[in-house]
Image (cartoon, rainbow, N blue to C red):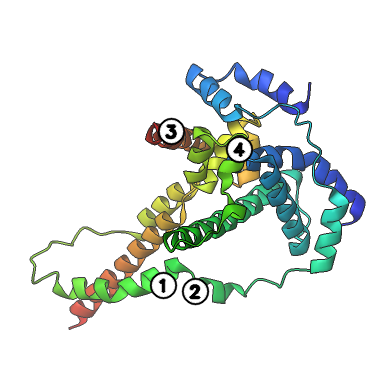
Amino acid sequence: MNERMMRMETTRSRWSPQEAALAEALQEGLAPHDPTPLPDPETILLLAEVLGPEPPPLPLPIRILTSWEFLAVLGSLPIALWVVRRWEEWGLDLSVPLEVPTLIAIGRALADAGTPGWETGLLLLGFFLYLTWEYALNTRHRI
Amino acid sequence: MNSAEFKALYERTAPELRAYLRRCVGSTDLADDLLQDTFIRYLRAAPADRGKAQTRGYLYRTADSILADHWRANSRRKRRDEHLAAEGVSGGEAHAADASGETSDRMTRAMQRLKPKTRRLLWLAYVEALSHREIAEILSLKEASIRVLLFRARRALERELEGER
């Protein structure tokens, strides 16, 4: 019995019937011991050597500046500014303070839940909106 | 990484990665090609020395990225073949899609439509039968989140399978 089969034996008892059915469906058609030999590792080593090392990744600032999250936030900024400038005209009450700790807590919760990119983007957008709102309020008070 | 270290890593991780790729593409030959590409990319990137769990996570992510490239190229080929077929030009027999495989079934198609992270989660939990702690280590997540993420992943797969009916 291989390592995976042994693990399976011990883990299976903890699964619900639905989980056990799912596991069975996922493994359907896959033999526990695949008789086909794996590709030769020597060939892989040789090919990797022939191709040479991959070029290094772009520097982090450039990757951030060209990421879609950053561009989305940047693109939404004019809309956010426009909304903030009009909010009084629309009679909206935005006096409920949205505090930085709240945002940090939301961010942490999202990170714990293994957030996909769009949720992070949304969080960044929210943070930007918050900053814009704060800025607009401060500016208005000074006036 | 020297040759002996690579071979040890390969022996340890290649069988499970091949099974994963095979489940995603439905063909052993194609899975082997993609497996080879995964390890070549791993060697060329020369990632810093990591623990076993991180290396495994890195390999799964690389395999998913190679799968994405493959599917993208495949859909381009399909579009081109359809275009050629519409013009009455024969073409594309050589690019029979993944359906050529032995396990091309509902589950394979459902797996193809899942998000890579969801796919990896389900695989590690229900095929590799790893504990939540091990999955968390491999996917760089918190152990406490795994239960919720697995629940969502199961729901996502159920939806995909229902869509297949």
Q: Earlier in the sequence, mark 2 or mark 1?
A: 2
Q: Amino acid at mark 3?
A: Leu
> Which residue has dot 4 on it?
B23
Q: Amino acid at mark 2?
A: Thr
Along the line of sight, the residue nearer the viewer: B10 or A89? B10
Q: Residue at x 66, y 32 (%)?
A: B128
Q: Quadrant of the C terminus of chain A?
A: bottom left
Q: Residue at x 62, y 51 (%)?
A: B61
> Which residue has dot 2 on it?
A66
Determine the secondary structure under disc 1: helix
> Which residue has dot 3 on it?
B161
From this viewpoint, which residue is outermost toward the bottom? A143
Q: Earlier in the sequence, mark 4 or mark 3?
A: 4
Image-based side of B19 in relation to A68, left or right: right
Determine the secondary structure under disc 3: helix
- The quarter holding residue B8 reads top right
Give the distance between the C-alpha atoms of the residues marked 4 and 3, in whole angstroms: 14 Å
